[in-house]
Image (cartoon, rainbow, N blue to C red):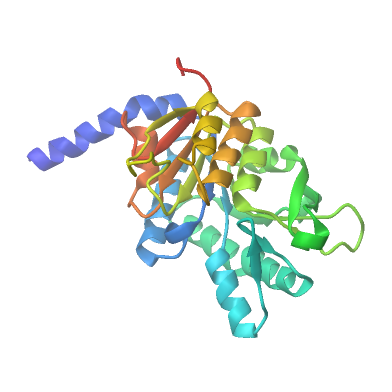
Amino acid sequence: MQEKIQVAKTLIDAFPFIKQFRDQIIVIKYGGAAQVDPLLKEKFAKDITLLYLVGIKPVIIHGGGKKINDMLEKLGIETEFKEGQRVTSRENMEVVEMILSGSINKEITSMLNHHGAKAIGVSGKDANFLKAEAKDSEKFGFTGNITDVDEEVLLNLIEEKFIPVIAPIATGENLGDLGFNINADLAASKIAVALKAKKVIFMTDTQGVLDKDMSLISTLFRREIDILIKDGTINGGMIPKVEACLESLNGGVEKAHIIDGRVEHSMLLELFTNEGIGTVIKVKDRD
């Protein structure tokens, strides 16, 4: 009986958060182990479906680096990274689009629909809702920076009760352009700003932002980020993630979260508990 009472108490404790976020758009960047491990994939699909069923409006942007690397290796196509981003050759681009817009996107969509959500998979090329230009064509090839988000395409899907599941492939400006491979973190921040999202959540393979003693920093304020980058506390692959968070906050998103996708139900723990489990980045002390 005590176990049943505890379950009820947990639901009651989550009630204020559900009420707060109901009818709000929450953008989620989905990647890392949570996108590869079969158990974590199943938990993620159930968590998103729960958000959907209680009236929250999730929007998912996914990566797919591991599957892309596996396919490139299988096909004997070389790939390289510079400054933490893939150099996307023409051959790479064809595989990237095939994996992201094809197998990964449809797998996520299928899992969500199986659990009772109403999800639809799209890439930025659909209705040209993501436009981009080359980041640096000589250095990065077909890796791009987003120049425009047609948010009405996504808002129309949300209005029709769909969960958009977005492959970060953007269209070019000219007819016949191959398109561009977009960093999923940066795509999530651009889309969150365009949709005026309440929150943006980045699922990673780390606890969140760590201090010099490798302990979790549970709360960061925007003004602290530059200091922590300059003194080396924030470094390596965490830098583009916090930069994506900053871009979101600067564009009007209230809060950005970096959470450990390796933890079961990490998203629910971050959203529906006072303590959370990752790092939340805020604009002001009073937030």
Query: What is the x, y in percent for residue 240?
Result: 58, 46
Residue for point 53% across, 65% down: 107
Q: Is residue 142 visible?
A: no
Image: 11 above or below 283: below
Q: Which is nearer the eye, 84 or 150?
A: 84
Q: Is residue 175 visible?
A: yes
Q: Which is nearer the eye, 220 or 23?
A: 220
The number of numbered discs placed on residues in the rendered structure image is: 0
Question: Quarter-wise, where is residue 19 in the image?
Answer: top left
Q: Which is nearer the eye, 20 or 95?
A: 95
Residue for point 51% across, 52% down: 30
Residue for point 47% across, 35% down: 55
Residue for point 92% across, 59% down: 175
Image: 193 above or below 239: above
For the N terminus, give its image quadrant.
Answer: top left
Q: Which is nearer the eye, 169 or 103?
A: 169
- Compared across the picture, whether 17 is left or right of 147 comes to left
Question: Quarter-wise, where is residue 59 in the image?
Answer: top right
